[in-house]
Image (tube, helix red, strand yellow):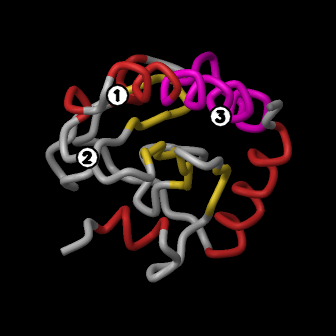
Amino acid sequence: MSSLFTRIIDGEIPCYKVAENKDFFAFLDINPLAAGHTLVVPKRETDYIFDVNDNELERMIVFSKKVAIAIGKVVPCKRVGVAVLGLEVPHAHIHLVPLNREGDLSFSKERVKMSADEFSLLAEKIGSEIVW
């Protein structure tokens, strides 16, 4: 059975897409640590980030960097943090989270509530700032 993220990539489950190319897909986390919290996933379903082949992982990091730079242009923050947990969904993914202090990257903290309109507008703004 396809992972949740594969179903999102395939359009079976709606999302707030930020960016995509032939190999990777970025979308807003619907249960974000901060406004702008984005997930980057390979389109090729792979469970564990360190099972992604070296060339693909290199390109995934570069793709993530472009998305993170765009997040930083749109969301007021000191940095965009990077986290790889890999336990919640069996599909390799990178979390990009706007940060103003270290505790902002704690996955045990209360999540930010946003409306569908806020998610849509934010995804559009971030996507428009990505420089390919």
Element type at marker 1?
Answer: strand
Q: Quadrant of the C terminus?
A: top right
Mark 1: which amino acid? Ala
Number of other residues with Cα within 10 Å of mark 2, as a class: few under 14, some 14 to 19, many 20 or more: some
Dominant secondary structure of the residues highlighted in magenta in the image: helix
Q: Quadrant of the N terminus?
A: bottom left
- Cα gap from disc 3 to disc 1, whole angstroms: 14 Å
**Residue identified by numbered label 2:** 46
Q: Please tell me whether mark 3 or mark 1 is closer to you in this view.
A: 3
- Magenta stretch in the rendered image: 60-80
In the picture, measured across the screen, residue 16 lies left or right of residue 81, that is: right
Q: Please tell me whether mark 2 or mark 3 is closer to you in this view.
A: 2
- Front-most of residues 122 and 16: 16
**In which quadrant of the rendered view does residue 53 lie?**
top left
**Residue identified by numbered label 1:** 83
- What residue is drawn where x is 79% and y is 36%? 130
**In which quadrant of the rendered view does residue 82 lie?**
top left
- Cα gap from disc 2 to disc 1, whole angstroms: 17 Å
Q: Is residue 132 above or below residue 100?
A: below
In the picture, measured across the screen, residue 80 lies left or right of residue 106, that is: right
Mark 3: which amino acid? Val
**Residue identified by numbered label 3:** 67
- Front-most of residues 28 and 93: 93
Number of other residues with Cα within 10 Å of mark 3, as a class: few under 14, some 14 to 19, many 20 or more: many
Number of other residues with Cα within 10 Å of mark 1, as a class: few under 14, some 14 to 19, many 20 or more: some
Pick whichever of labels 2 and 3 is earlier in the sequence: 2
Residue 109 within the segment the image draws in magenta: no
Element type at marker 3?
Answer: helix
